[in-house]
Image: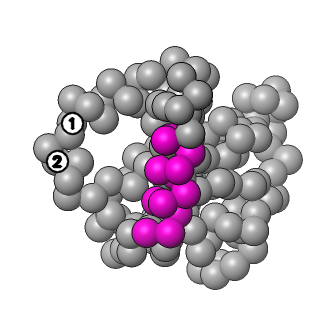
Amino acid sequence: MKGFRRRIIDGARSLRKEMTQAEIILWKYLSNRGICGFKFRRQYPIDRFVLDFYCPEKRLAIEIDGGIHNNLKEYDQIRQETIESKGIEFLRFKNSEVIDDIFSVLKAIKKRLSLLHEVEKGGPSEARDGMRYYER
């Protein structure tokens, strides 16, 4: 099992070095606590899977799906169910959404973070409203 975990971690490191165009664009906004002050990690291993982006504080996974995912619908569904069974929320976007309309994607992420924050605090969101960079 130790060797398996090592392969997952090495795979995540490799993916960090070979990010897609959509991942690079989104990471520009998520890095350095750029959205609502929450820390995101990229290519983060959970169980036997690697998440594109993950916010540990809010337990939020963000996946960016390229064309290859059209052939992996069943696998993606099983993967998502496994991750959600661990109490992790899931947001999924297509490459084209990130590349063509990043501000709608960021708005959806901010909305989910605010909802998760409200549920956690039991009241109105105390999260900073907005992004550090590139506010529209």
Horizontal arrangement in the rendering, residue 54 relative to residue 122 (left or right): left
Q: Amino acid at mark 1?
A: Lys
**Helix, strand or loop under label 1:** helix
Estimate the x, y position of residue 1 in percent, counting from the top left.
Answer: 54, 22
Residue that label 2 marks: 70
The label on residue 113 is none
Q: What span is in magenta?
A: 7-18
Q: Residue at x 21, y 36 (%)?
A: 73
Q: Residue at x 84, y 31 (%)?
A: 121
Estimate the x, y position of residue 47 in percent, counting from the top left.
Answer: 53, 28
Estimate the x, y position of residue 22 in percent, counting from the top left.
Answer: 40, 69
Magenta-colored stretch includes residue 39: no
Tell me if residue 87 can be seen. yes
Of 18 and 124, the residue lying toward us: 18
Q: Amino acid at mark 2?
A: Asn
Estimate the x, y position of residue 39 in percent, counting from the top left.
Answer: 74, 55
Horizontal arrangement in the rendering, residue 31 relative to residue 89 (left or right): right
Please identify the quarter of the rendering in which residue 20 is found: bottom left
